[in-house]
Amino acid sequence: MAAKTPLVAFLIGMTSFLFVVAGQISPLPSGGQLPGDLFALNIASKIRTDRNATTMASSDFGRIMEAAPEAVLHPATPADIAALIRFSTSSPAPFPVAPRGQGHSARGQSLAPGGVVVDMRALGHGHRRINVSVGAGYVDAGGEQLWIDILHATLQHGLAPRAWTDYLRLTVGGTLSNAGIGGQAFRHGPQITNVQELDVVTGTGQLVTCSRDKSPDLFFAVLGGLGQFGVITRARIVLEPAAKRARWVRLAYTDVTTFTRDQELLISKKASEAGFDYVEGQVQLNRTLLEGPESTPFFSSADISRLAGLVSRSGSGAIYFIEAAMYYDEATTSVDKKLEAVLEQLSFMPGFVFMKDVTYVQFLDRVRMEEEVLQSVGVWDVPHPWLNLFVPRSRIIDFDTGVLKGILGGTNPVGVILMYPMNTNKWDGRMTAVVPQTDEEVFYTVGLLRSAVAVGDVERLERENEAVLAFCTKEAIQCKQYLPHYTKQDGWRRHFGAKWDRTVELKAKYDPHKIMAPGQTIFRSPTMSAAQ
């Protein structure tokens, strides 16, 4: 019979103990491995080991990686998470722990093979952990809270966060552990730069409140830290007065140089100048998006026909869109004039400007509409071998030529290809998140957000992703992965670059047993290495 790991023995012991005591929690006899405060917190009743629970926590949105945990914790409070982590670190062979919100990672980053997955959504059961401080201009939100729920809660007070991801059915802790980027980042920075304070359960099981002034090393480590230093259980997020409506615009281009020049002009404008509040860009190859269900919420049938003709005339099989929005309240005349003034400065294809007027919520939650369409045709819950890159401004044309018109030229991908610039000075270099290590004021995010809908698609798309990375290496394009995935530590060393030594130092301080977020594969504990 195989020897029981400390985790398995722990789970079996708790199950037996609770059965015998019939729900009355009291300390184990001397010699037991569980800390006494574990039972005082009644954590045993919140752990599930049944197949239904572990199967749900064995995969993620990417549908590429699978790894089963031994158990799933459904915490009622952050103290429950702390108790679990302390038990792990006190065990002879500490087991891995991974927080999971919506499981929207693409490469198994939220999995905990052989360990415990913490179902963060349980923290919000029975009460909504969202508290708006109107006078102070911030909202305190639990790490498990969805951004869409924060939007609705803050709008009741005429306020809203400044920075958003494109998809709002994501948790606060999840996006802040990466960076949280979207079309407002050019002006307000990513979501991590719009946080004033955090509550974190560290990898040693300590509950710490941190900010730029209080435990700043933990604060900056956790923001963009890929879950390596602890679990975010609360974030204090900056708010601004909310608009009521949005003028949503798409502008078509056939020339990448003109497209990027106009994008960079738009993100150079200050908040006090006439300009857009949101700026992103898309690349469409071979009419893919024009024919797909993603297009239905915005373009009419007549629009699609005109755009298809534009693709044919472009010669390269690609067209580009600036997607932008102006927020406003009720005075449509003023937004009309403001928009006209901005459009006069741009060089999009004449006659190829498309507009929609929607509510502020409809615009921010626009991907939800696309999700519903994709679900209806069965192409949402499919593998997503996504690749997201930050590309230096000076090399974006080379990237377009070699990747979009080269490696991907002639392909007919199902999904979205994003390409838009951000201002480097809106990122705080003290945070763990990394951007291209250049002196350039602008870099681009490129998202190859493609879906595998047919047999063999995963393997083909993975090969193309590898070819893209190989091209960047060969051509010395100093790109950085966003939502990164590396299988070897050498890859992570290159990824963090000048921040690597500091990352190792902070890991040793806040997660010395290397148990946190093992799915990232940045650090491997002795226990994990021995099990492989």
Image (spheres, helix red, strand yellow):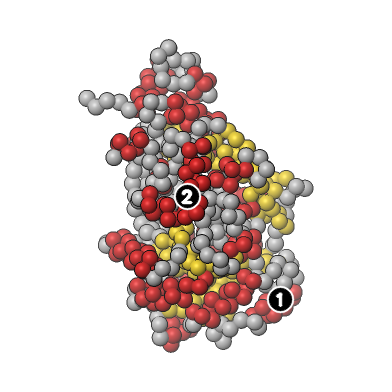
Q: Is residue 146 visible?
A: no
Q: Is residue 12 above or below residue 233?
A: above
Instruction: Classify 10 Å Cα crowding around label 2: few (below 14), some (14-19), many (20 and above).
Output: some
**x, y percent for residue 31:** 40, 14
Q: Which residue is mark 2?
A: 500
Which of the two discs, 2 and 1, sits closer to the camera?
2
Q: Quadrant of the N terminus?
A: top left
Residue 338's disc number: 1
Instruction: Classify 10 Å Cα crowding around label 1: few (below 14), some (14-19), many (20 and above).
Output: some
Question: Number of marks in the image?
Answer: 2
Question: Label 2 sits on what residue type?
Answer: Trp
Residue in view at x 36 percent, y 68 percent: 474
Whether tag 2 and tag 1 are in contact, CB under 8 A, the answer is: no
Residue 134's disc number: none
Quarter of image, res 184? bottom right
**x, y percent for residue 148:** 58, 52
Residue in view at x 64 percent, y 64 percent: 187
**x, y percent for residue 150:** 62, 49
Quarter of image, res 200? top right
How far apart, in angstroms, are the residues tagged by discs 2 and 1? 45 Å
Q: Secondary structure at mark 1?
A: helix
Residue in view at x 49 percent, y 18 percent: 36
Q: Secondary structure at mark 2?
A: helix
Question: Label 1 sits on what residue type?
Answer: Lys
Residue in view at x 49 percent, y 77 percent: 320
120 left or right of 151? left
**x, y percent for residue 149:** 60, 49
Between 448 and 145, the one lying in front of the other is 448
Between 120 and 358, the one lying in front of the other is 120
Q: Quadrant of the C terminus?
A: top left
